[in-house]
Amino acid sequence: MTVSQEVAYIQKRYSRSVANVFIKLRKAAGCTSYEDFAFTHDFPRAQYWRVETGKANLTFRTLSKLLAIHNMKLDEFLQQVIEEYKRDEKNFKNGNDDLSDKIESKIGTLIGT
């Protein structure tokens, strides 16, 4: 595997976990939407949307700013990302993907089952 292939693999495997950690941190800080968080902390709205959707290629500067906002150390953040990744992997392997469950529930409500 080349270095670029390995980078792409790591990004694909962990981007959802990083995004989920930032969503949880935002909600724990009392911000109900990414827009509210971005406005409150003078953070570019579109950039923060990319962070929470896993589409951002986070620079160390951006990551440092977000961690400072949340008063969090890098090692604490990385530990949360690893834990989130493990939960996500476990749910996926067990067929308990939260998103899938929510979609199935919504569809069931819409069709009356």
Image (cartoon, helix red, strand yellow):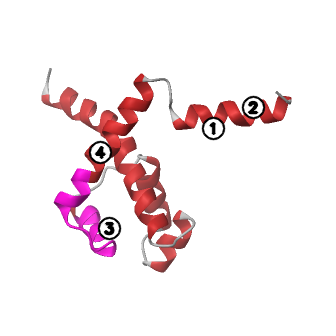
Q: Earlier in the sequence, mark 1 or mark 4?
A: 4
Question: Is the N terminus in the top left, top right, bottom left or bottom right quadrant?
Answer: top left
**Residue 66 image label:** 3
Q: Please provide percent x and percent y for residue 17.
A: 36, 44
Q: Which residue is mark 2?
A: 107
**Residue 83 image label:** 4
Q: Is residue 66 magenta?
A: yes
Task: Please state which of the two labelled residues, at mark 3 or mark 4, is closer to the viewer.
Answer: 4
Q: Earlier in the sequence, mark 2 or mark 4?
A: 4
At horizontal 50% and vertical 32% (from top left) the residue drawn is: 97
Gap in Å between the C-alphas at discs 2 and 1?
A: 9 Å
Task: Please state which of the two labelled residues, at mark 2 or mark 4, is closer to the viewer.
Answer: 4
Gap in Å between the C-alphas at discs 1 and 3?
A: 29 Å
Task: Please state which of the two labelled residues, at mark 1 or mark 3, is closer to the viewer.
Answer: 1
Q: What residue type is disc 2 on?
A: Ile
Gap in Å between the C-alphas at discs 3 and 2?
A: 36 Å
* Element under disc 4: helix
Q: Please provide percent x and percent y for residue 93.
A: 40, 23
Q: Which residue is mark 1?
A: 102
Vertical order, 74 against 108 (above or below): below
**Residue 36 image label:** none
* Element under disc 1: helix
* Element under disc 3: helix
In this rendering, would 59 be left or right of 110?
Answer: left
Gap in Å between the C-alphas at discs 3 and 4?
A: 19 Å
Q: Residues within 10 Å of mark 1 (few under 14, many from 20)?
A: few
Question: Is the C terminus in the top left, top right, bottom left or bottom right quadrant?
Answer: top right
Residue located farthest toward the top when viewing the structure as drawn: 1
Residue extent of the magenta highlight: 61-79
Q: Quadrant of residue 111?
A: top right
